[in-house]
Amino acid sequence: MNLHQRGSELIHQLKDHVLEVLRSHPDAVSNGKGILQEEVARRAGLHSMGSAELDHTCSEMLKMLHREGLVELVDEGGQDEKKKAWRLSKD
């Protein structure tokens, strides 16, 4: 496996990990009220530990999953990325 393939695989694994977090939270199901991005990051181990990059990583995974139609944004949360609420898309 070359470096490009490894990178693609890592991104795929991160997206699956974030989906697993959403599936495990009752408010993140397709008819739920959604959970805040900062809660997704915390539960996934991608919360800020003095590193904005980890929060950014969670944000980017959620945006990718949104483009793929797997998650939906419930509440925009204003300007604060961490205050956005997400849930799984309807089946």
Image (cartoon, rainbow, N blue to C red):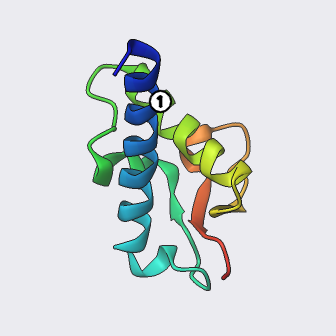
Q: Amino acid at mark 1?
A: Ser
Which quarter of the rendered picture does the C terminus lie within?
Answer: bottom right
Say if 79 sits above or below 83 in the image. above
Q: Quadrant of residue 54?
A: top left
Residue 80 is left or right of residue 23, and the answer is: right
19 or 56, nearer to the observer: 19
Point out residue 37 in the picture as x, y percentages from the top left corner. 50, 50
Residue 14 is left or right of residue 79, and the answer is: left
Residue 84 is left or right of residue 20, and the answer is: right
Say if 29 sits above or below 79 in the image. below
Point out residue 34 in the picture as x, y percentages from the top left corner. 56, 70
Secondary structure at numbered mark 1:
helix
Point out residue 43 in the picture as x, y percentages from the top left corner. 29, 54
Q: Residue at x 71, y 37 (%)?
A: 79
Say if 28 sits above or below 12 in the image. below
Q: Residue at x 59, y 59 (%)?
A: 85
Q: Quadrant of residue 11?
A: top left
Point out residue 5 in the picture as x, y percentages from the top left corner. 44, 24
Residue pushed farthest top? Answer: 3
Q: Residue at x 38, y 15 (%)?
A: 2
Q: Circle 1 is placed at which residue position?
A: 8
Mark 1, Cα crowd under 10 Å, few <14 / some 14-19 / many 20+, is few
Report how many numbered discs are placed on residues in the image.
Answer: 1
Residue 57 is left or right of residue 74, and the answer is: left
Q: Residue at x 50, y 28 (%)?
A: 56
Residue pushed farthest front? Answer: 1
35 or 64, nearer to the observer: 64
67 or 27, nearer to the observer: 67
Which quarter of the rendered picture does the N terminus lie within?
Answer: top left
